[in-house]
Image (cartoon, rainbow, N blue to C red):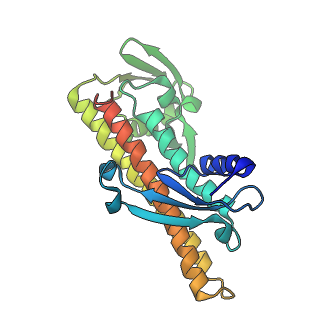
């Protein structure tokens, strides 16, 4: 349990680590940051069901911090979630935006550029116009990036100008965006698992650690990564409802 001033510190730490669906167990002071918690992990489709069927997991951040760099690990996991959020904002709006196209990555002459570095971008009703007269040799690369990104675009070239019609908001378009959202979610989960696997691989190389301690820390790392995957699932559920017009 947490009392008085310690309670606020623990709540701040919970917020910092973005742990959802938890029930506080104990809070042990360590540099005013890490603590021991127990939380209930449930997939989006299982929320609201019998709590007895939901998986309860425990993470002791104090013990983790003695063995691995918890700040580095959570920072990497946070970055994966932020990447998912950014992709949702940039590429999955009902109306394609100039802002999304400006940040579109174009591979040109073995280097990555944003579209705004290669073209002048302007917007007209139902149409985005790209003036590529400064870098006409980049037009094939730009057309390729526009066609193969996940915004369902159909660019049309006229000399050094490329016209990008803004897709109509049809049921099919909404369903395509929802499918693309699932793709970004899968990529995020893969990133989280890669981070988890690399951390565990590094942990197992520490020959000075007792096997039972390695096993315990591995469990904490796995539980933490599952929490981030659960968070990604929540974000996907919310975004798909928004794209399909089902949000309240």
As drawn, the residue found furthest toward the top would be 125
**Residue name at image x 43 percent, y 35 percent:** 91
**Residue name at image x 47 percent, y 34 percent:** 89
Q: As rendered, which of 13 and 188 lies closer to the eye?
A: 13
Q: As rendered, which of 47 and 178 lies closer to the eye?
A: 47
As drawn, the residue found furthest toward the left would be 171
Figure label count = 0
Relative placement, left or right, of 142 versus 211 is left
Q: As rendered, which of 152 and 133 lies closer to the eye?
A: 152
Relative placement, left or right, of 172 versus 129 is left
Where is residue 243 drawn, in percent x and y? 32, 32
Residue 117 visible (yes or no): yes
Where is residue 10 drawn, in percent x and y? 66, 52
The quarter of the picture where residue 156 lies is top left
The C terminus lies in which quarter of the figure? top left
The N terminus lies in which quarter of the figure? bottom right
Q: Using the image, determine if residue 96 lies above or below residue 61.
A: above
Where is residue 54 drawn, in percent x and y? 36, 60
The quarter of the picture where residue 179 lies is top left
Relative placement, left or right, of 105 versus 245 is right
Residue 194 visible (yes or no): no
**Residue name at image x 53 percent, y 27 percent:** 119
The quarter of the picture where residue 40 lies is bottom left
Q: Using the image, determine if residue 190 lies above or below residue 235.
A: below
**Residue name at image x 63 percent, y 88 percent:** 210
Q: Using the image, determine if residue 118 lies above or below residue 221.
A: above
Where is residue 94 drawn, in percent x and y? 35, 26
As drawn, the residue found furthest toward the right would be 31
Q: As rendered, which of 118 and 63 lies closer to the eye?
A: 63
Relative placement, left or right, of 179 versus 220 is left
């Amino acid at each position: 349990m947490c009392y008085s001033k310690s309670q606020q510190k623990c709540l701040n730490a919970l917020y910092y680590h973005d742990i959802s669906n938890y029930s506080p167990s104990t809070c042990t002071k360590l540099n005013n940051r890490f603590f021991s918690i127990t939380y209930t992990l449930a997939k989006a489709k299982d929320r609201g069901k019998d709590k007895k069927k939901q998986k309860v997991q425990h993470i002791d951040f104090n013990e983790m911090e003695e063995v691995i760099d918890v700040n580095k690990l959570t920072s990497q996991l946070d970055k994966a979630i932020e990447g998912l959020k950014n992709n949702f904002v940039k590429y999955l709006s009902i109306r394609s935006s100039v802002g999304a196209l400006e940040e579109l990555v174009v591979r040109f002459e073995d280097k990555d550029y944003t579209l705004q570095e290669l073209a002048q971008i302007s917007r007209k009703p139902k149409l985005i116009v790209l003036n590529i007269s400064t870098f006409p040799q980049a037009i094939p690369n730009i057309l390729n990036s526009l066609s193969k990104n996940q915004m369902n675009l159909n660019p049309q070239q006229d000399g050094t100008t490329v016209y990008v019609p803004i897709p109509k908001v049809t049921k099919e378009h909404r369903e395509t965006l929802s499918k693309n959202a699932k793709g970004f979610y899968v990529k995020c989960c893969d990133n989280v698992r890669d981070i988890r696997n690399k951390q565990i691989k590094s942990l197992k190389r520490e020959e000075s650690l007792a096997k039972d301690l390695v096993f315990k820390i591995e469990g904490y790392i796995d539980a933490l990564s599952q929490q981030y995957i659960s968070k990604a699932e929540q974000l996907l559920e919310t975004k798909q409802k928004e794209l399909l017009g089902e949000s309240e």
